[in-house]
Each structure stands twice: as structure tokens, then as C-alpha cells.
Amino acid sequence: MVAAGTLLLLAGCGLAGGPDETPSADGSSSAAALPQGGEPFDLDPASLTTEIDNEYWPMEPGTQWVYRETDEQGHELRVVVTVTSETKDIANGATARVVRDTVTRQGDVVEDTFDWYAQDADGTIWYLGEDTAEFENGKVTTTEGSFEAGRDGALAGVIVPGDPAVGQAYRQEFYPGQAEDNGAVLSLDEQAEVPAAHYDRALLTKDTSTIEPDVLEYKLYAPGVGPVLTLGVSGGAGREELLEVGMIPAGVATAAGTTPLGERYD
């Protein structure tokens, strides 16, 4: 409720109304160095690293976050996000860290995804695509949403800036007509109360979709931890809150990156 009240306050102040750029101390735009929409961006894929240590989402291999998600119908889902020990060569020339995101309902997998991330020299975390599948009764029903930067017009996007500043706006992913998500930094001094802990100095972002204009989410990232709370306030999304975070055995981290989607790896 603390976080929800904060979001209402931000909306009232106008910050939640749109990702307007905020001038920095030297008069330049804080969003100028981040990619926008489908515009080309000068990113050297070869300069990216799979060693991701951004303060707001450090991805050490073997780290695992467990979330409880409540959807718009009130159904409860379990979300397990695991930084695997595996990497993937991306079509745009980058090498990415493979992060597995598994969603289950009453023990059955309903969605399973390999996400691909890398970090640049400034600490910005780049999103390079995903291999995703939805399941029903153990069978794949769709792989819609899968894309890879450098293939079929898909471009890399930003998940967390290396030096976040209020007013920054950026694309998170761009696959024409399929995945066109955007982010904006609203605050760097928020707090969130979730089952895992109480977190201060959290980064608050506003996430939107160009092709689904009714979708709106707010996400809070705790320093040294990563995403701790996601609130869907429009477009049918729900609430996702961190239950626990910890390290898993090396063998499980490897299996998470190599076991086919939909199959257990622990």
C-alpha cells in the first residue's frame, strides 16, 4: 500500500503522465544517450559484457528471485527468475547472459522464457531478446513475443540505465508490431514493502507499450537486489511481489540455462 500511495502521488505531480525528458545540470537532456522507439542507436555489441553488476539489478550467475504474482482475476502465480551460467550469441553480434523466467500455477508451467541481457561500459543493462513459450496441459500453445536483436528488424533496448536520472525515457524492446515496450525513470528514492523485506532508495520506473497503449505498469528496483515489486495499473496486469532472493547450486544454474522450456530444471 505504501508503494501504491507513492504511485498516486507521482501521478498527481505529473511525473506519471509521460516520459518527458529532464534537463541535466549542464542543460543537456538526461534521456539523450538512450535509445528511443525504433530509431537506430550507436551501440557496439562487441563492447557488451555478460558480467552484469548494475546496482539496481545485479545478475550474478546462480542468483534466483521468487515472486508471487496475483493476476487481474485474483489467481495466484509463482514466478521464478534465475540467472543461469549460460550465455548466448545474439544475431546483432553481442553475447548475452541467459536468464530464465518460469511462471507456474499450482505447480504447472504456464509460461517459460529465456531472456537475454548484457551490460555496457556505463553500467546500462541491455535487453537483447527472448525465447518464450506459453503452456496449457503441458503443451505449447504459443511462442508469440519471441524475438532476437539483429533479426527481422528487432533492436536491443534498455532495462535499467547505468546512471538513472528522473525524466530519462528509453525503449526497452523493439520488434516491429510484436514487442514495442518503453520505460521511464520516475524516482530514485522510493520504498517498497513486500514479503521478502522492506526496501528503501528504490528506483521507480513507468513501463508502457506503444502497440498496447492501455497497458501501464510501475516497477520498483531495490539497490543490490533487483526488481522487488511490479504494479499493473492498467491493461489487465496484476501485482508481482518478491518473496525471496538467494543463490542456487552451480549445477542448477547450469540446468536452468540448458533444460528445454516447460521442463523442470531443479
Image (spheres, rainbow, N blue to C red):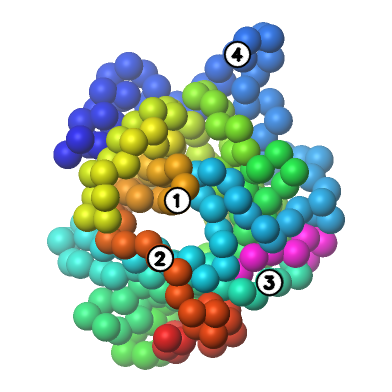
For disc 2, the neighbor class at 10 Å (few under 14, some 14 to 19, many from 20) is: few
Mark 4 and mark 2: Cα distance apart in space: 38 Å
In the picture of the structure, the residue carrying the numbered disc 2 is 246
* Residue at 60% across, 69% down: 98
Mark 3 and mark 2: Cα distance apart in space: 21 Å
Amino acid at the residue labelled 4: Pro
Residue 226: image tag: 1
Q: Secondary structure at mark 4?
A: loop
* Label whose residue precedes the other's in the sequence (2 or 1): 1
Task: Give, as a single range, the part of the protein colored magenta.
Answer: 91-99
Tag 3–tag 2 contact (CB < 8 Å):
no
Mark 1 and mark 4: Cα distance apart in space: 27 Å
Q: Eyeballing the image, is 22 above or below 127?
A: above
Q: Is residue 145 left or right of residue 80?
A: right
Between 153 and 53, the one lying in front of the other is: 53
In the picture of the structure, the residue carrying the numbered disc 3 is 87
Task: Report if residue 96 lies within the magenta region.
Answer: yes
Tag 3–tag 1 contact (CB < 8 Å):
no
Between 80 and 179, the one lying in front of the other is: 80
Counting from the top left corner in percent of width and height, residue 87 is at: 68, 71
Q: Secondary structure at mark 3?
A: strand
Q: Nearer the viewer, mark 2 or mark 1?
A: 2
In the picture of the structure, the residue carrying the numbered disc 4 is 23
Amino acid at the residue labelled 2: Gly
Amino acid at the residue labelled 3: Thr
For disc 1, the neighbor class at 10 Å (few under 14, some 14 to 19, many from 20) is: many
* Label whose residue precedes the other's in the sequence (3 or 2): 3
Q: Nearer the viewer, mark 3 or mark 2?
A: 2
Judge whether residue 112 can be spotted in this image: yes
